[in-house]
Image: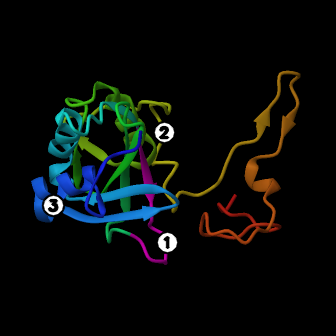
Amino acid sequence: MAMPTTGDARLDTAKLQAQFGDDILSVTERLGETYVCVNRDQIAKIHEFLKNDPELSYDYFVECVGVDYGAWNHDRDFIERFEVVYNLYSVKHASRLFIKVGVNDGQKVPTVKNVFLGAEYPEREVWDLLGVVFEGNEQEERFLLPEDWVGFPLRKDEPLGGEDVHFHDGASGPAVEDLQQPHAGESFEGTTGSEGVSGR
């Protein structure tokens, strides 16, 4: 059973707009999925509302992920460099909803781990790999990466560099940058093919 509607709108987005007003920045449909862009400061309250409203029952926290749009020159939902995208699911309605916030370096996103305990580790992963800080879920040591790691590897301005691969028989293989092939993508700045991308 899909999310009920009220008039021409989904019940969940209509109730969000009625409850939070201007803190709901936009609602868009893409490829059959619904994305709601919201004010970063209200993210925990919005999650709590979606979870506890008996008509909506978004009771399953699927994931949250971070996206770096620092090198993206096309239309997007926020002016901030990063987006955090929350994936929520209503078991009652078999319905999915994506909630998005924008954030820049030096800004914090309020944690939602006090609403959904399952958000604690995904938020830590986003911090460790992108450098987005979640207020109330800060950490002093790396979560996935070695303690001496410098930088955040999923940022688009992070060099692709690498180390030669050491195999179990004692042989070594080339680093990833030594095998790069030309492509038409926009996944990073730098050159590919015969020229190095990290200055090695």
Label 1 CA crowd tier, 10 Å (few <14, some 14–19, many 20+): few
Q: Where is residue 120 in the image (x, y as percent from the top left)?
A: 32, 29
* Image quadrant where one finds the C terminus: bottom right
Task: Name the foreground residue: 25 vs 178.
Answer: 25
Local SS, label 1: loop
CB atoms of marks 2 and 1 within 8 Å:
no
Local SS, label 3: helix
- Residue 88 visible: yes
Q: How many marks?
A: 3
Label 2 CA crowd tier, 10 Å (few <14, some 14–19, many 20+): few
Quadrant assignment, res 62: top left
Quadrant assignment, res 134: top left
Q: Mark 2 points at which residue?
A: 149
Separation of marks 3 and 1 at Cα, in angstroms: 25 Å
Q: Which of marks 3 and 1 is in front?
A: 3
Separation of marks 2 and 1 at Cα, in angstroms: 26 Å
Task: Name the foreground residue: 24 vs 96.
Answer: 96
Q: Give the range drawn in magenta.
A: 63-76
| Sequence-wise first label, 3 or 2 | 3
Q: Name the amino acid type tagged 2.
A: Trp
Label 3 CA crowd tier, 10 Å (few <14, some 14–19, many 20+): some
Task: Name the foreground residue: 5 vs 15.
Answer: 5
Q: Mark 1 points at which residue?
A: 72
